[in-house]
């Protein structure tokens, strides 16, 4: 019974966090969020990645979390690969780095100096912004010649990813706080009525 309740809470968190990220991005960027060839597709990939990573890493279910992220990666590349081998590297890099950013976020918000919702949202915005920008550096390491030959283009891409990551972090922070509030209210009311 306890595992079923934990699974319900995890599904609520996953739905609210991922849904909020994808929903708000859809509100801003429309159908581009669901188009694999558009840069706004990052919101879809990252929204689900963030949701999966948060609900499993939050409760220290690292093995399950890594398994779910691997399954998510396999599903994602199976749907969008279309014979392009770069997709395997691209999506793997995004999923790994975003999941690590969520893990780092969980560690940082556990510190005593992060006490309120606003500071947690600020931390999520900064961490996701920086790590999403770092993804461009990692992807450019696959072609060192490209790294130096197209350095200004890389800086532009890093800045775009910084903005996207900051929005992801803001949406993630809002989604986490909203899901925590919803679970607190729902389960307190359930306990009172039982």
Image (tube, rainbow, N blue to C red):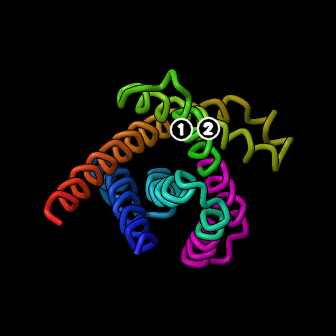
Rate crowding at label 2 as few (under 14), some (14 to 19) or many (20 or more) other CA atoms within 10 Å. Answer: many
Residue at the spot 42% in from the left edge and 26% down from the top edge: 115
Residue 170 percent across, percent down from the top left: 40, 37
- Residue range in magenta is 69-98
Which residue bears the numbered disc 2? 131
Residue nearest the viewer, comparing 169 with 93: 169
Of the 4 image quadrants, the one containing the N terminus is bottom left
Q: Relative to 4, does residue 20 appear above or below in the rendering? A: above
In the image, which disc is placed on residue 63? none
Q: Is residue 122 left or right of residue 25?
A: right
Residue at the spot 67% in from the left edge and 41% down from the top edge: 136
Residue nearest the viewer, comparing 185 with 158: 185
Of the 4 image quadrants, the one containing the C terminus is bottom left
Q: Is residue 158 left or right of residue 50?
A: right
Q: Quadrant of the rendered structure where residue 104 is?
A: top right
Residue at the spot 81% in from the left edge and 50% down from the top edge: 142
Say whether marks 2 and 1 touch (CB < 8 Å).
yes
Q: Is residue 71 magenta?
A: yes
Residue 72 percent across, percent down from the top left: 57, 70
Which residue bears the numbered disc 1? 128
Q: Relative to 52, does residue 132 appear above or below in the rendering? A: above
Residue 87 percent across, percent down from the top left: 66, 65
């Amino acid at each position: 019974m306890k595992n079923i309740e934990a699974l319900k809470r995890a599904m609520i968190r996953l739905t609210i966090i991922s849904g909020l990220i994808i929903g708000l991005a859809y509100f801003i960027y429309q159908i581009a969020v669901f188009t694999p060839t558009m840069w706004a597709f990052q919101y879809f990939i990252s929204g689900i990645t963030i949701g999966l990573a948060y609900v499993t890493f939050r409760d220290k279910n690292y093995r399950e979390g890594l398994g779910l992220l691997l399954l998510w990666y396999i599903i994602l590349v199976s749907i969008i690969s279309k014979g392009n081998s770069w997709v395997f590297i691209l999506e793997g890099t995004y999923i790994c780095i975003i999941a690590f950013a969520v893990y780092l976020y969980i560690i940082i918000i556990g510190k005593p100096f992060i006490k309120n919702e606003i500071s947690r949202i600020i931390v999520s915005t900064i961490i996701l912004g920086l790590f999403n920008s770092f993804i461009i550096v990692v992807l450019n390491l696959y072609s060192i010649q490209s790294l130096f030959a197209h350095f200004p283009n890389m800086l532009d891409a890093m800045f775009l990813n910084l903005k996207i990551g900051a929005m992801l972090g803001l949406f993630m922070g809002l989604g986490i706080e909203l899901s925590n509030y919803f679970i607190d209210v729902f389960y307190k009311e359930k306990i009172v009525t039982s």
